[in-house]
Image (cartoon, rainbow, N blue to C red):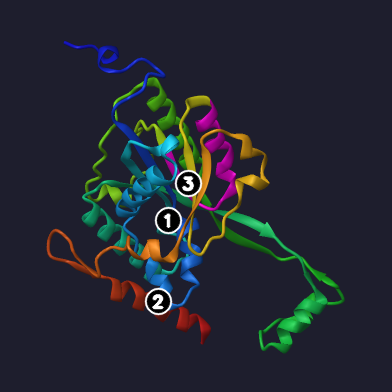
Amino acid sequence: MQSDSDRRPMPGKPVSDRRVNLYVDGYNFYVPLSSLPEDQFELAWCNFHRLGEYLVERLAQERPREFGGCRLGAVKYFTATIPADFPKDHGGARRKQDWLDALNRVSGGRVEIIHGTFRERKHRFYIERGELDELVRSGIPVHLGELGNRRTFRPRMAIHEEKQTDVMLACSLLLDSALGREGRLPLAICQHPPLHLTNPRPTPAPCHAAIVLSADIDFLPAAEMACQMFACPVAMAFSFPHQGYDLADLEAQSISGLTTRRISEEELRTSMLPAEVVLTGGRTITLEHFRKTHFEKVRTMGD
């Protein structure tokens, strides 16, 4: 039997099948779109596998030295699941599940969904008396009598924070780039239902270049390490409506292989899921329902 080392090229040796992995920061992508008008919010109905293929093709043309001769490898989408016992927007949770079902179906499971979670944290904040008076004038009920003569109110409240997703994305980028540098063979990921709704950890998938779809500058150190330690070029991609940042303004401008790219509204529009997706079993999910339920929530909150 052929050993694993016999089947792998030597570390640092050029490989014939160069793969680019796409890592998507789910909330960084979705939240800005959720506040836009209806014809732009629909861009959240995204097929990340199709977007990944497009970006790899364009980067090969725009930056052939780093991405030439590459094809799309793994696509990993990092999000967070709100526990059932947390207060939440049930319509929003259902809408997200529908989109994940549609994405899994259309991509054939080639977009791996990875779930972090939310945790409750007690947070103390400060409100000055003048700010409370403005709330009262705006018609918001405030029990001023309970404050007495205090000029500053220090209430405590529970806030829900997304946990683990950013760290998992950064760790996955570094692990995959290290495996690619070592010469591990590419891996075809196929995520079968219902794992796309519960999967807590990314599958190791060797890559030789990477795209990080996020405008969060916190991913920059991991991208720098992938470039420097594992010779893995990384494109930091900022999706509409993000403006992102310019590497020329940062110390990272001298990092070989690190670049930025903006994804326009038009490019997102060409990467949307079909308007209607029929799942195994016959259930139909539509863009119209996805869009309609979101804006019904927005209108209700505004009443």
Report the label total: 3
| Residue position marked by numbered label 2 in the rendering | 39
Mark 1: which amino acid? Pro
> Which residue lies at the image location 56% right of the left edge and 60% below the top edge?
243
| Residue position marked by numbered label 3 in the rendering | 165
Magenta stretch, residue numbers: 210-228
Q: Is residue 217 magenta?
A: yes
What number is the disc on residue 83?
1
Q: Could you say which is closer to the camera, residue 267 or residue 145? A: 267
Question: Which of the marked residues, 2 or 1, is nearer the chain's N terminus?
Answer: 2
Name, please, the residue furthest toward the left.
Answer: 281
Can you tell which of label 2 and label 1 is closer to the viewer? 2
Could you say where residue 98 lies in the image, as x and y percent from the top left? 29, 64
Distance of label 3 from label 2 (alpha carbons): 29 Å
Question: Which of the marked residues, 3 or 1, is nearer the chain's N terminus?
Answer: 1
> Which residue lies at the image location 12% right of the left edge and 61% below the top edge?
281
| Crowd band around label 3 with a 10 angstrom C-alpha radius: few (<14), some (14–19), many (20+) | many
Q: Is residue 17 magenta?
A: no
What number is the disc on residue 106?
none
Q: Could you say which is closer to the camera, residue 276 or residue 226? A: 226
Tag 3 secondary structure? helix
| Crowd band around label 2 with a 10 angstrom C-alpha radius: few (<14), some (14–19), many (20+) | few
> Which residue lies at the image location 57% right of the left edge and 41% below the top edge?
220
Q: Could you say which is closer to the camera, residue 125 or residue 259? A: 259
Distance of label 3 from label 1 (alpha carbons): 15 Å
Could you say where residue 284 lies in the image, as x and y percent from the top left? 19, 68
Q: Is residue 177 above or below residue 266?
A: above
Mark 3: which amino acid? Thr
